[in-house]
Image (cartoon, rainbow, N blue to C red):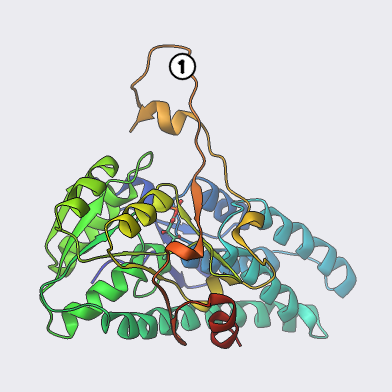
Amino acid sequence: MTARAVEWLNGKLRILDQSKLPWEQTFADLDDYRDVVLAIKDMRVRGAPAIGIAAAYGIALGASAIRTANKDEFLVLLNQITQAFAVSRPTAVNLFQSIDRMEKAASGEGVSEVKRALVNEAKRIHREQIAATRQLSQLGAELVKDGFTLLTHCNAGSLATAGYGTALGVIKAAKEQGKRVSVLATETRPLLQGARLTTWELKQEGIPVTLITDSMAGHFMQQRRIDCVVVGADRIAANGDVANKIGTYTLAVLASENDIPFYVAAPTSTIDRSLSSGHGIPIEERNPEEVTSIHGVCIVPEGIKAANPAFDVTPHSYVTAIITENGIAREPYAEALKLMVA
Ligand code: MRU
C-alpha cells in the first residue's frame, strides 16, 4: 500500500512531498493555505485528482484562519483564498471543480457554520475521489487480459489521485483479479514522474515494471511488446479530447499507427463539459530550468533556451476508450460522456 499523498490530520493537511521521491519519504503538515498553494505550484502535491483534493482542504484551512464573524467580510477574504488556488496550476480541471464546490459550500448563514461546512465538503470531495478511482479501476481492469504488458506515462497512481489511482488503478485492479500483468513505464521528462514515482508505486504493489525513456515507446510498440497503453488525464473536453502529461499525444499517435488500444482512465471530475474541444484547454508552461537541468544538475551549455509545456492534447480520434467510474465511454464521445457526467 502506497503512503497517502494527502491526508487531513487533526485540522492540518499532511502531504507526502512527491518532489523528494524516491530518495526520501518526507511528510509535511500544512496549516497555512499559502503553503498548500505553494505545494501545488512546486508539485510536491501533483496529479489532477490530488491537486483538486489538496486545494479543497487548503481552502478549508484558509477559511478556518479568517478572523471575522461578519459573513460579507468573510466571503471577500474567502474569495482571495480561492483565487490564490485558481492561479496555482491551470490545466487540471479538478482544481477548478473543487473551487466551485467549496464556493457553493460557503452558502450557510453564520461564519462558524460555513467553516465547518468547508471542512466537510473537502472531506466529501476526497471520499468521492477515492470511491471513483476504485470503481473506474474495477471497470477498466475488464479491458486487461491475463499476460498483458501495459505502457503507462507519467504517474497516475495513488500519488496522483490521493485514492486508488487511475491508469495505475486499472493495472492494480487487473492484478487483484488474478491476471498476470507487467508494465513499461516511460521516464516522463522533464520531471521524471514515471521514473521516480510510477516505478516506486508499482514496486510496492509487486507489479513487474520496466523503465524506458520516452523516446523508446515507438520501438517497443513496433516490436509488439505492448498490448495496450493506459494513461490518466488532467482535463477531458466534451468531445473526448484529452489533456495529459506532455508526450501523451506522441504515444497516442504511435499506438494508433501500431494498432494498439489507447485507453484513458479518469474520474468524471476530470471531464470539462464546458469545453467543446481540446483547443480551449489551457496548457501550463513551466520554468525552462526543469528541462535544462536534471535533479539540480545543469545539462546544457550556458545560455541555451528550452521550452517546457507541461501537457499536450490528444485528439479523441486516437482514444480507444475513456474509463470513468460511471462506465467506459467510446466514440462518439460527445454522446457517451454526456451520459457519464451527472
Ligand atoms: O504535472 P503532473 O505531474 O501533475 O501531471 C500529472 C499527469 O499528467 C497525470 O497523468 C494526470 O494528472 C492524471 S493523474 C491520475
Is the CB of mark 1 within 8 Å of ligand 1? no
Label 1: which secondary element: loop
Specify whether 309 is left or right of 99: left
- Please identify the quadrant where the C terminus is shown: bottom right
Along the line of sight, which residue is nearer the eye, 166 or 27? 166
Residue 180: name its quadrant: bottom left
Q: Is residue 181 visible?
A: yes
At x 57% / y 40%, what residue is drawn?
Answer: 285
At which x and y percent is residue 99? 67, 68
Kindly identify the residue that appears in the image at 46 percent across and 16 percent down: 304
Examine the rendered structure and indicate whether residue 244 appears above or below residue 207: above
Give the quarter the ligand 1 occupies. Answer: bottom left
Q: Could you tell me the amino acid type at mark 1?
A: Ile
Quickly name the residue at label 1: 304
Percent x, y for residue 135? Answer: 38, 86
Quarter of the image with the N terminus is bottom left
Q: Position of residue 149 (x, y in %)?
A: 16, 65
Within 10 Å of the Cα at label 1, are there few (<14), some (14-19), or many (20+) other Cα atoms?
few
